[in-house]
Image (cartoon, helix red, strand yellow):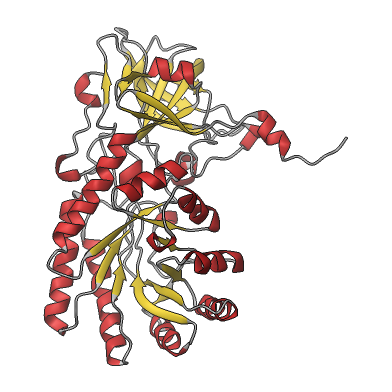
């Protein structure tokens, strides 16, 4: 791989690159992240390991914040909520807050992590389609900015819990707009046949708004929409916003003031060079602001505060997974030979290829090779034939056991969705910033796993 393939320019704040902006290949062939060679990283923090380019993540967060602030400066302003489900640690939550972002959480665990990182409750939101009493009570106690209500039943439940705690819960209603965008079926979230939200099409959304207006222990402050994930065009967001604004007009006619609109996340990135390039944060912000202006001009209603929830587009390109190669073997297939390259991780640290048929790429990480490339499939060490890390990638034919292999763009939903399948400990996360390594999350050990086993014999 030459230098050009590793360059990851971020023009206009757009996550165009596959690798982080501070990743380069040294003349020796070794990858270097923010001044630290991967060999040094692997020596200090054995593989498998998630490696985070801290300044890259910060710069992408800053790009979203600046884009939204600029686009909505003449309106009612905007908030950017980092979607903590993509990846969260105490330090990372703190960094996002330092860059001016709020934190979107989807469980008590995510909320507590953000709080432990120094993020105030007032800068957090709570999502989820099946919130527990404990989660709602914690959100009320910490004074979160809003609780996103997902159903009529949950609306009643939140009101009861708030009443029992002598509180008034600030809520958004999550609406399904019928706008379907994004990649795999499992990550498209605004069509009707799925678990999230209150349907606009069937009228349930308006029923929920009317009911929320009646209840004494909830305060309806906003409407929310999330149309999917890995979206590489602006049209879906604009369409969803228009549907939300139609519901806002109806609410106004009923005497219900809706002063905040959250258009969710789902902004796409490139996992391979073949993927589409998504519009930049500035372009997304410009389109959304234009839809808001048209709504205000058409209806005469005051401009709402607008929020978005990027996650993947901030953290995914900023992180790669570093593996050590083990078994390498050739397998005959109809069109020739495929080389299987096994690494010391797999579906336990990246379930996305198995779950979503997601594509990734990979690079030999610690040396140059003059050998010709060959068609390879990078696989994990689990007892599943679907344990595939990279389906098809050209790697040097002299790749061998002990080589370091790097898979880029794993920052979103890699560590977050990691498991202990086959009793493998989950990998840790190390951040690199200006030549300094900092362990954000330590790797688990087998002793950690056994400590959960309560057998006394």
Residue farthest to the right, as pictured = 457
Q: Quadrant of residue 24?
A: top left
Image position of 204 with respect to 148: above or below: below
- Place of residue 298 in the rendered image (x, y in percent of width and height, measured from the top left): 13, 81
Residue farthest to the bottom, as pictured = 254
Total marks placed: 0
Image quarter of the N terminus: top left
**Residue under the image location 33 percent in, 61 percent down:** 264
- Place of residue 116 in the rendered image (x, y in percent of width and height, measured from the top left): 49, 49
Image quarter of the C terminus: top right
Image position of 245 with respect to 236: above or below: below
Is residue 410 rendered to the left or right of residue 297?
right
Is residue 456 rendered to the left or right of residue 264?
right
Q: Quadrant of residue 299?
A: bottom left
Front in this rendered view, residue 28 or 168: 168
Front in this rendered view, residue 3 or 289: 289
Q: Quadrant of residue 246?
A: bottom left
- Place of residue 266 in the rendered image (x, y in percent of width and height, measured from the top left): 33, 54
**Residue under the image location 40 percent in, 43 percent down:** 92
**Residue under the image location 36 percent in, 24 percent down:** 436
Front in this rendered view, residue 238 or 309: 309
Q: Is residue 302 visible?
A: yes
Q: Is residue 177 visible?
A: no
**Residue under the image location 39 percent in, 58 percent down:** 188
- Place of residue 386 in the rendered image (x, y in percent of width and height, measured from the top left): 53, 36
């Amino acid at each position: 791989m030459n230098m050009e393939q590793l360059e990851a320019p971020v023009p206009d704040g757009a996550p165009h690159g596959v690798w982080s902006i501070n990743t380069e290949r040294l003349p020796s062939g070794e990858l270097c992240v923010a001044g630290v060679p991967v060999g040094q990283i692997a020596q200090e923090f054995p593989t498998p390991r998630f490696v985070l380019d801290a300044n890259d993540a910060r710069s992408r967060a800053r790009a979203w914040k600046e884009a939204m602030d600029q686009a909505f400066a003449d309106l009612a302003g905007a908030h950017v909520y980092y979607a903590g489900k993509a990846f969260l640690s105490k330090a990372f939550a703190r960094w996002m807050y330092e860059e001016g972002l709020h934190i979107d959480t989807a469980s008590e665990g995510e909320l507590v992590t953000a709080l432990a990182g120094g993020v105030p409750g007032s800068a957090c939101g709570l999502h989820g389609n099946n919130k527990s009493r404990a989660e709602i009570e914690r959100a009320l106690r910490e004074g979160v900015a809003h609780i996103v209500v997902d159903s009529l039943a949950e609306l009643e439940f939140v009101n009861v819990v708030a009443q029992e705690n002598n509180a008034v819960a600030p809520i958004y209603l999550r609406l399904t707009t019928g706008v379907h965008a994004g990649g795999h079926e499992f990550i498209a979230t605004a069509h009707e046949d799925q678990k999230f939200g209150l349907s606009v099409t069937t009228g349930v959304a308006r029923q929920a708004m009317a009911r929320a207006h009646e209840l004494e222990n909830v305060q309806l402050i906003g409407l929310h929409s999330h149309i999917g994930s890995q979206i590489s065009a602006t049209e879906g967001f604009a369409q969803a916003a228009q549907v939300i604004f139609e519901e806002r007009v109806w609410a106004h006619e009923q005497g219900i003031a809706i002063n905040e609109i959250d258009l969710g996340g789902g902004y796409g990135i490139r996992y391979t060079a073949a993927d589409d390039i998504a519009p930049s944060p500035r372009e997304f912000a410009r389109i959304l602001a234009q839809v808001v202006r048209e709504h205000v001009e058409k209806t005469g209603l005051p401009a709402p505060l607008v929020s978005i929830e990027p996650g993947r587009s901030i953290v995914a390109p900023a992180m790669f997974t570093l593996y050590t190669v083990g078994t390498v073997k050739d397998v005959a297939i109809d069109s020739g030979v495929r080389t299987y390259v096994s690494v010391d991780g797999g579906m336990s640290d990246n379930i996305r290829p198995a779950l979503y048929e997601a594509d990734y790429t990979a690079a030999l990480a610690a040396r140059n090779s003059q050998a010709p490339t060959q068609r390879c499939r990078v696989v994990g060490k689990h007892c599943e034939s679907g344990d595939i890390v990279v389906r098809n990638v050209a790697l040097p034919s002299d790749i061998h056991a002990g080589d370091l292999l790097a898979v880029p763009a794993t920052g979103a939903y890699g560590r977050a969705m990691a498991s202990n399948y086959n009793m493998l400990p989950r990998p840790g996360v190390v951040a690199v910033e200006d030549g300094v390594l900092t362990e954000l999350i330590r790797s688990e050990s087998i002793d950690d796993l056994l400590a959960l086993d309560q057998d006394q014999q």
